[in-house]
Amino acid sequence: MTDIAAVTELPLQDPQNSAHPCPELGYAGAHHMPPTPSERPAIEFVDVSYVAPGGQAVLSRLNLSARAGETLVLLGRSGSGKTTTLKLVNRLLLPSAGEVRVNGVPNSKGDVIRLRRSIGYVIQDVGLFPHFTVERNIGLVPAIKGWPQERIRLRISELLQMVGLDAALASRYPHQLSGGQRQRVGVARALAADPGILLMDEPFGALDPLTRAELQQEFLALQQRLRKTVVFVTHDLREALRLGSRIALMEAGRLVEVLAPKDFLRSNDPLVSAYVHAFEDRPERTGNRGTE
Amino acid sequence: MNFFHFIGQNHAQVLELTLEHLWLVGWSTLFAIVIGIPLGIAIARHPASSKPVLTIANIIQTIPSLALFGFLLPVPWLGDRADRLAILALTLYALLPVIRSTYTGIRGVDPAVVEAGRGMGLTDSQLLFQVQLPLALSVILSGVRVAIVISVGLATIAAAIGAGGLGEFIFRGLAMVNNQLILAGAIPAALLALLADFSVGWLEKRLQPR
């Protein structure tokens, strides 16, 4: 019994050695998926529509759910409604119709502040408070939740280590950090009060490719340990394949399909394969050929 | 009799009028801050109301100061004492820079920072006091600085309605065609303006985030 448990707990093949169904895209199989993903949805969208204040329909009748502990990637081009979908979860936006449920409860019920404090939020521009040091940025939510000083201090050093930042950076200000370090602080801040759900809006989008790959790798390692329910917005197919337990492709405010990464690449859906094709070009083929 | 000689002979009166001047400017600036900053915050939160409020403040600014003092003269309680009246008029003039700088400062806070704060579950007042106001502070102070400098200058006109201040010397000098008397009012007023400008500027720099 214990042996089996130990084996099923043992998740991963080495991504380097595993068979790549699509090596081009660096897809390494769903190696980080929980072996037995819980079926209880942590987030549910039930017939959700959103009309922008200007009258433009941004989302139409979205039905989608994120299972507890999975990384659900919302993939799609700009303006497809990904970010709107994300902001509906922590009520930065309110749906025009339909209902968003968080842990089974409609998120329109109850206190919005409490809801938001139970959900980590990471955005592309990071949004660190420029007048706070790194430690104050990270410790803000615990502090306003009334944690004792000592516990906050411990949590900050734990988080810094978790996101791979040197403890010496704690007293720095955001403008003294590199882009990658800033985003790490952003992730640490979102994790500070140990929320069950993490919303990430293109968190690595503004980083250079090397830093991005590094942070993606660390995200996988972290997620394997923490098993948060993550909703991750990106337009980058490679990132989606790499990080997602499932990928929800969105187009013009509608959900096209929700597929596991390996099925995504094999899908016959025209919109899905169009997205895959757009990413198939390799740099060496698209590079400057004018040297002959 | 040269200028310094005059100051030396009348230093008690120069000091008294300077203090009166400071009294007028101090109260009016305080009122402008107490009214203007909350008003600026309010219109930054509800941008639809920003236009009417700023327009009214703008219009007040365009009323010639002598005329404004005159308008207010018949108002019952105010007209009883010239300094009340002067303080009200100066407050009205000082409002625009304070309201506008508060509005601009708060609207100017990086939207990503505000969104992150909101998404993290800060309440409106936590967002205001911990994030928006501290980040807008130096812009707000630059408005206060402008308000003070304007007030110091305008307060000289308050002497026309008998509110005292360094304007006394200026008006007396004008009536007597005595340049020294005019300078005895104008130079201390200019120095006050410079001093206020410098000290608020220093504060602004010290309180700058980062």
Image (cartoon, coloured by chain):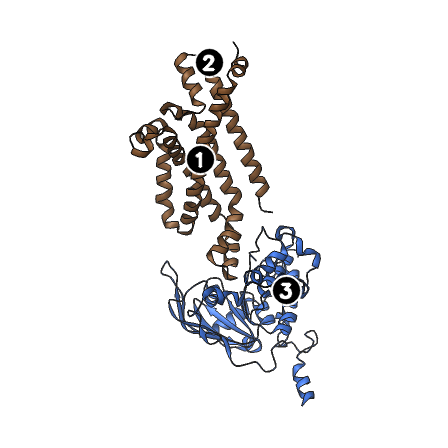
Chain colours: A blue, B brown
User: What residue type is disc 3 on?
Assistant: Arg
Residue topped by disc 1 = B27
Q: Chain of mark 3?
A: A
The mark nearer the N terminus, 1 or 2, is 1
Q: Residue at x 46, y 56 (%)?
A: B124
Asked if the residue under mark 3 is in contact with the one under mark 1, i.e. CB atoms within 8 Å, the reply is no
Q: Chain of mark 1?
A: B
| Mark 2 and mark 3 on one chain | no
Q: Is residue B94 above or below residue A134?
A: above
Residue topped by disc 3 = A151
The location of residue A109, given as percent across then percent down, is 42, 70
User: What residue type is disc 2 on?
Assistant: Asn
Q: In screen coordinates, is B109 left or right of B58?
A: right
Residue topped by disc 2 = B179
Q: Secondary structure at mark 1?
A: helix
Q: Residue at x 37, y 59 (%)?
A: A53
